[in-house]
Image (tube, rainbow, N blue to C red):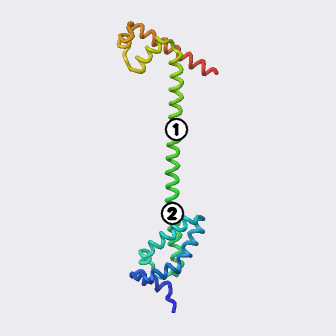
Amino acid sequence: MVTSDEDLAQAAARGDSAAFAVLVRRHYDGIFRLAWRLLGNRADAEDIAQEVCTALPRKLQRFDARAKLSTWLHRVVLNAVRDHLRRQAVRNRAAQGWGEVTAFRAAEAAETRAALDWLSGAMSSLAPDLRETAALVLGEDLSHAEAGAVLGVSAGTVSWRMSAVRKAVRARAAAEEEL
């Protein structure tokens, strides 16, 4: 005599492991098949089938036998697939967001490198006394008086040199813009 799915479900809900084992044997292939049809991916379908079967003892306690067990199981599988797809969409959005951040940081780093390369080229084209003065005032953040003391010139000379540096850098930028 074959026990009905509904009777097995009630026995499994009360903790009958043999009844639960019979239910899983009867319905595992159908659970897997529906998950595979909904997802189109064998590995994900296997994960869903295992997830449903693992949660089944707890879920069977809410089975009220108003519908056939197979109909109820289809609903459980459908909900598990929907949850899986939502989690996957969240992971994809998060990954895409990180990808956008990474791309932005890479673009920002490239822009900074390009600006530093341009500035390095501009500095190397300066006369040595102007380059030294700019390095002390701009790079080391020394006052004109402090830079003058290091270079052995007056603060006024440092001011004149910094003016010459600005003019040279502007002229180089203007020349490159025309190209």
Label 1: which secondary element:
helix
Residue 102 location in percent, x, y? 50, 42
- Residue located 52% across and 18% down the image: 124
Above-or-below relation of 177 to 96: above
Image position of 122 (left or right of 135): right
Residue 174 numbered mark, or none: none
Above-or-below relation of 94 to 64: above
Q: Are marks 2 and 1 in contact (CB under 8 Å)?
A: no
What amino acid does circle 1 point to?
Ala
Between residue 93 and residue 128, name the one nearer to us.
128
Quick one: label 2, few (<14), some, or many (20+) residues within 10 Å? some
Above-or-below relation of 28 to 153: below
Mark 1, residue position: 106
Residue 75 location in percent, x, y? 52, 73
- Which residue of the protein is positioned furthest toward the right in this rendering? 179
- Residue located 49% across and 59% down the image: 87
Between residue 109 and residue 128, name the one nearer to us.
128
Image position of 99 (left or right of 61): right
Above-or-below relation of 2 to 94: below
Residue 59 location in percent, x, y? 44, 74
